[in-house]
Image (spheres, rainbow, N blue to C red):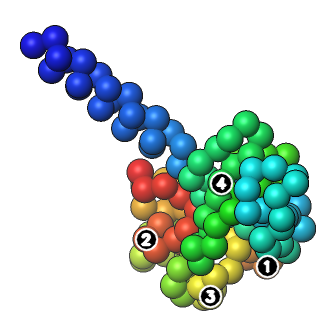
Amino acid sequence: MKIFYFLVLVCYFFSFNAISEEIFLSLKKNKVNVRYGPSFESPIKFVYKKINLPIKQIDKKENWRRIIDFKNNSGWIHSSQLKKINSLIPLEDKILFKNPSNFSKPIAKIKKGRVLLLIKCENNWCKIKTDKFKGWIKTQNIWGKLKS
């Protein structure tokens, strides 16, 4: 019986630990280097040139975060280049509504792939801001928010 409780405890610890690693973050600057490994000596793999781009942290080592983006590009970024999530990317075209309801007034059509600044999320809706507009989109098929 003791072995059973030990195995349950071990499974719980590892599943909790794995879930806690995957979080969404945003890029802090307009130019962020992504490296092959977790050090400044590691070669640059590619460079992001979009502030607020949402990325998912999938691993960490000291001050480095292994990330993946919505196009499945991955690599290592120093934590100083990242901030708490404040953006989303729709993976399909979306309608921006005045209020969080399908019956609300449509404001604009949001194209897939556009970086949207996140204000807040409630139920199946997120309030966002883009260049000229502020409103609500449904949370289905967006990159930048873990399913609640």
Identify the amino acid type marked 2.
Gln
Location of residue 129 in the rendering, given as x and y in whole percent from the top left corner: 71, 68
Q: Dot 1, crowdedness within 10 Å: few (<14), some or many (≥20)?
A: few
Q: How far is mark 2 from mark 3, CA to CA?
A: 14 Å
Q: Nearest the camera: 119 or 55?
A: 55
Contact check, label 3 and label 4, Cβ < 8 Å? no
| Element on which disc 4 rests | strand
- Compute the Cα span from label 3 to label 1: 14 Å
Q: Mark 1 points at which residue?
A: 132
Which callout, 4 or 1, points at the residue further toward the start of the chain? 4
Which numbered tag is attached to residue 111? 3
Residue at the extreme left: 1
Give the residue pinned by disc 4.
66
Q: Mark 2 or mark 1, which is nearer the start of the sequence?
A: 1
Residue density around tag 3, few if under 14, some if 14–19, many if 20 or more, within 10 Å: some
Horizontal and vertical percent for residue 5?
19, 17
Task: Residue 140: give its label.
Answer: 2
Question: Residue 55: percent from the left, percent from the top?
Answer: 65, 62
Say if residue 82 shows up in the picture. Answer: no
Which residue is depicted at the point 23% across and 25% down?
7
Q: Residue at x 64, y 67 (%)?
A: 74
The alpha-carbon separation of the residues under discs 1 and 2 comes to: 23 Å
Q: Which residue is drawn at 47% across and 67% down?
A: 139
